[in-house]
Amino acid sequence: MGLRVAAALLPVPLVLFLATGFEYGKTSTDVVGVNVDALPQLAQELLPMVETERLNACPEIPLIWLLAHVQAESSWNPRAYSSAGAAGLLQFMPGTWTEAGGGPGWATGAGPPADHPVWDPQSHLRVALPWMCANLRMVTGHIEATGKPTAPLVAMAVCHIAGCSRVTGSETGIPAPGEAGCGTVCSGEVRAYIDTIHRYIQAWAAPVTLPASTGGNAQPYTGGNTGCVIPDPTGTGGCVTAATAWMLAQSQAAFPDIPVACYRPATWGEHGLGRACDFVIGRIGAYPGPALTQRGWEFARWLQDNAAPLNIQYLIWQGRIWSVARAAEGWRVYNGAGGLVDTTEPTGGHYDHVHVSVTQ
């Protein structure tokens, strides 16, 4: 589309639950619930249509991502128009509108005529979604082929604001200053744009309602910071710290039915330091059904309740993260280390396992 600056029904429930993909008949990529009352008015009014079109045109784009993407572009103002000539909800340039199948474009200086379909929210979204999906599928293939450490949805956002050449021509998929013809201003605007999408995802995510606490109280760890010196009890051949070994033993005593693995190579962050374990809910690579998801939340609730005695630093489960340092914010949307991990797939989003990191 080229870098540019965007200008600043049916009844729906308070929370649109899309947590499992199995119980509610949605696709498994719809993994974050939407707090409908937090959305702009037009987004609320169009939500049934948006969800129908999304499922038909591109179920790979999670609903909450699409809603936040439109907000980053136009603040859900269907008449948004930029000085660069971009128009409508998703700020299409005239040439891109035509390329996407929307019909004739418009003169950049004059802007679209009043009756142009780019201004109509429903017409606009029906043209935009297949075009966005084509970009998403292209960059997904590129990332898989090159191993670039950027999530496909983030790369799609780069395509939208700066052009897909900034994905394919950069080392990571997000252009650094000077890469792929993207200077310092361009790179800063791309990163700010991605941050804006993530910010609205956080703001519009439905609160997590945890099940009642089960499993009792954990016995507190009273040792010190030992480093990674204990052979990993989960049989990986690696090591864990004494605090991790204690957390693991207490967790397995309270929830003996949940398989677990701890140590990973050094490139796996805290796993490589012996300070993290993954408790598998169901099967790795698969979205758990409702009963297993509930079991995972019961375990996560127990870990949260016992964070102090177990020296827990943070937890990740079902596309959400909870940390001791930001406990007042509850279970926030997990952004995949700032977009480096694809959070819409089972393992990247931690839908198939509960991740536990300890402080020492």
Image: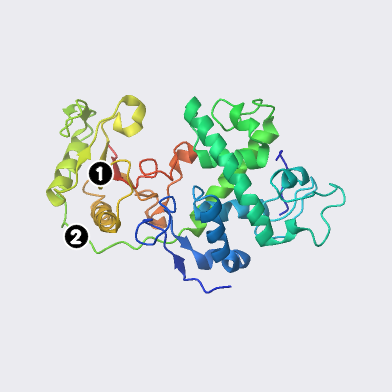
Secondary element at image label 1:
strand
* 90 with respect to 273 (left or right): right
The image shows residue 176, relative to residue 35, as above or below, that is above
Q: Quadrant of the C terminus?
A: top left
Cα distance between the residues tagged 1 and 2: 18 Å
- Asked where in the image residue 263 lies, by quadrant, the reply is top left
Q: What residue is disc 1 on?
A: 280
* Extreme-right residue of the structure: 110
Which is nearer the eye, 14 or 18?
A: 18
Q: What residue is disc 2 on?
A: 214
The x and y percentages for residue 229 are: 19, 26
Residue found 64% across the figure and 25% down from its top: 179
Secondary element at image label 2:
loop
* 161 with respect to 268 (left or right): right
- Asked where in the image residue 341 lies, by quadrant, the reply is top left
The x and y percentages for residue 234 are: 17, 34
Q: Residues within 10 Å of mark 2 (few under 14, many from 20)?
A: few
Q: Amino acid at mark 1?
A: Val
Q: Is residue 79 visible?
A: no
Q: Say which mark, if any, is on residue 68.
A: none
The x and y percentages for residue 65 are: 53, 51
Q: Amino acid at mark 2?
A: Thr
Residue found 25% across the figure and 47% down from its top: 282
Label 1 or label 2, whichever lies nearer to me, is 1
The image shows residue 176, relative to residue 162, as above or below, that is above
The tag earlier along the polypeptide, 1 or 2, is 2
